[in-house]
Amino acid sequence: MSLPPVWGARVSPPASLAICWLLGMHRRRAQKEFLAALTQLKIWTKLQGLAGQNGHWERNGFLRKMG
């Protein structure tokens, strides 16, 4: 299975977190990887002119769930 060129645009943040977990990372490391994936996703959406919507959704949705 090959990943699309810009996987952050195709893989949802919950899926990224699941990938981190499946690789056996402990919670703290997984959280860092998850935030890095969100940052990359934010940069990509900014290039596409969608940064406003996505930034709001990331901060208020998934980061709060992570605790």
Image (spheres, helix red, strand yellow):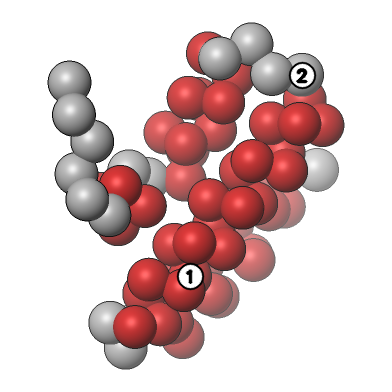
Secondary structure under the numbered disc 2 in the rendered image? loop
Q: Quadrant of the N terminus?
A: top left
SS state under label 1: helix
Q: Residue at x 34, y 83 (%)?
A: 47
The answer, for residue 67, to whether it is visible in the render is yes
Q: Is residue 58 above or below residue 33?
A: below
Q: Earlier in the sequence, mark 1 or mark 2?
A: 2
Q: Which residue is mark 1?
A: 42
Amino acid type, callout 1: Lys
User: Residue 26, relative to residue 66: is it above or below?
Assistant: above
Estimate how packed mark 2 is, as few (under 14), some (14 to 19) or many (20 or more) residues with alpha carbons within 10 Å: few
Residue that appears at 73% across and 43% down: 32
Q: Residue at x 32, y 88 (%)?
A: 49
Q: Is residue 28 left or right of residue 60?
A: right
Q: Is residue 11 left or right of residue 27?
A: left
- Image coordinates of residue 40 in percent, x first then y, are 49, 62
Residue 18, disc: none
Give the quarter of the image for residue 6. bottom left
Q: Position of residue 7 (x, y in %)?
A: 30, 47
Q: Residue at x 72, y 52 (%)?
A: 64
> Badge 1 local density, few (<14 within 10 Å), some, or many (20+)?
many
Assess whether mark 2 and mark 1 are in contact (beta carbons under 8 angstroms). no
The amino acid type of the residue labelled 2 equals His
Q: Position of residue 55 (x, y in %)?
A: 53, 75
Name the residue carrying label 2: 26
